[in-house]
Image: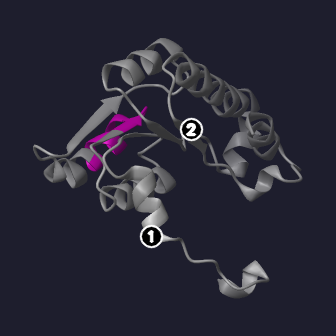
């Protein structure tokens, strides 16, 4: 995979990452997807105060909960939240109730053929969820929102890429 980069890989600075997460309340939106799940896994290693996992898929959230709820302690709260990333009222409530510091927004449709066959849903999910996350973050005065995008947004040649580009 390194030959695909066209450059030497850059290793993440573990100390910098830990400072960004240590003792904070982190919310991963779209936690049930492959990227969101991996984010949750990595974040748990960086000593957050709480990890909130939000996803619209009940089965994905159930699997996450089985995997990660066992890490919940008196020093670390791990919570699964079933909900739609487009639901502005829900996001505002979550961000305020749990005093969220940082959001990782990974809730997006990423499979080009499916989004091409369902363009209105792809645009709605990818663009409106980002809008709602940003508005809720502004409302709750969050410290940071990290948006997970795709290389397909750089020069979009399809609806999925274009929807991600608009969101960026």
Instruction: Identify the element where label 2 is drawn.
Output: strand
Q: Residue at x 19, y 47 (%)?
A: 69
| Label 2 – label 1 distance at C-alpha | 19 Å
Say which residue label 1 marks. Answer: 14
* Residue 41 placement, left or right of 152: left
Residue 145: assigned label: 2
- Badge count: 2
Residues shaded magenta: 53-64
> Foreground residue, 123 or 88?
88
Furthest residue to the top?
89
Residue pictured at 54% horizontal, 25% vertical: 137
First in sequence, mark 2 or 1: give its number. Answer: 1
Query: Which is nearer the eye, 3 or 113?
Result: 3
Could you say which quadrant of the image residue 3 lies in?
A: bottom right
Quarter occupied by the N terminus: bottom right
List x then y, in percent, for residue 130: 63, 30
Whether residue 32 is situated above or below residue 12 in the rendered picture: above
Give me the residue at 66% from left, 24% from top: 131
| Depicted 167 relative to depicted 112: above or below | above
Above/below status of 102 relative to 70: above
Q: Residues within 10 Å of mark 2 (few under 14, many from 20)?
A: some
**Neighbours of disc 1 within 10 Å: few (<14), some (14-19), many (20+):** few
Near-viewer residue (147 or 32): 147
Find residue 67 and report its horizontal and vertical position in percent: 23, 55
């Amino acid at each position: 995979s390194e030959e695909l980069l066209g450059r030497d890989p850059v290793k993440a600075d573990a100390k910098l990452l830990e400072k960004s997460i240590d003792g904070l309340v982190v919310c991963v939106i779209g936690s049930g997807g492959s990227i969101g799940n991996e984010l949750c896994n990595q974040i748990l290693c960086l000593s957050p105060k709480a990890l909130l996992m939000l996803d619209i898929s009940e089965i994905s959230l159930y699997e996450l909960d089985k995997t990660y709820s066992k890490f919940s302690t008196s020093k670390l709260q791990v919570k699964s939240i079933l909900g739609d990333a487009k639901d502005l009222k829900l996001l505002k409530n979550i961000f305020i109730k749990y005093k969220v510091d940082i959001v990782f927004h990974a809730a997006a449709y990423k499979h080009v053929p499916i989004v091409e066959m369902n363009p209105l849903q792809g645009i709605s999910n990818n663009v409106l969820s980002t809008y709602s996350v940003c508005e809720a973050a502004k409302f709750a005065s969050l410290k940071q929102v990290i948006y997970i995008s795709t290389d397909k947004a750089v020069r979009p040649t399809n609806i999925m890429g274009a929807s991600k580009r608009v969101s960026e």
